[in-house]
Image (tube, rainbow, N blue to C red):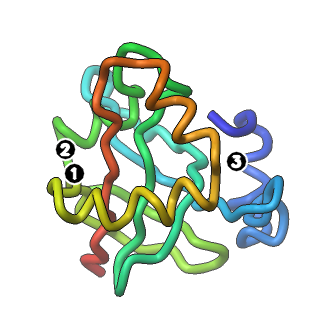
Amino acid sequence: MLFGKEHVERYQETDGAEGHDWNGTTVLILTTTGRSSGLPRSTPLIYRSSGDAYAVVASNGGAADHPQWYKNIQADPEVGVQVLGDRFTARARTAGREEKERLWPVLAATWPDYDNYQAKTDRDIPVVILDRVS
């Protein structure tokens, strides 16, 4: 997670005026449904636009296991997304090989540590596409 719960709440309250621009990049808020709890879980993630969709990386800092939010979207791909003041429902999906090959350099240019994270794990770090539903 990029920053704590209070920062996520501040992003949400200010329509991203506080928190969207972070450490030279941009952040959205992804809200998944907890696969065990059924409760909403909001996570700040670095993103880039991909056509009409958004792309994020399930890096988990290069850990051996996927982040919890990624496991949640595998169980229920309908998610909430907030980019600045724009809040919408999206369907999350893992990018296919060709799509990931196209997007990874763009995302790694945005946050160079993604390449470091991939180098330190045997896990193929997924790129996730958030396609707007409503």
Provide the residue designation for mark 2: 76
Q: Earlier in the sequence, mark 1 or mark 2?
A: 2
- The residue type indicated by label 1 comes to Thr
Residue 53, above or below 120 = below
Residue 7, above or below 39 = below
Residue at 16% in and 54% down: 97
Provide the residue designation for mark 1: 94
Name the residue at the bottom extreme.
Answer: 52
Apparent side of residue 114 relative to residue 102 in the rendered image (left or right): right
Residue 36, above or below 33 = above
C-alpha span from label 3 to label 1: 24 Å
Contact (CB < 8 A) between labels 2 and 3? no
Callout 3 crowding tier (Cα within 10 Å): few <14, some 14–19, many ≥20: many
Q: Along the line of sight, which residue is nearer the eye, 17 or 105? A: 105
How many discs mark residues in the rendered view? 3
C-alpha span from label 1 to label 2: 13 Å
Apparent side of residue 15 relative to residue 71 in the rendered image (left or right): right
- The residue type indicated by label 3 comes to Val
Pair 3/1: label in front: 1
Residue 59 image point, x, y percent: 46, 35
Residue at 28% in and 57% down: 100
Checking the image for residue 8, the label placed there is 3
Q: Earlier in the sequence, mark 3 or mark 1?
A: 3
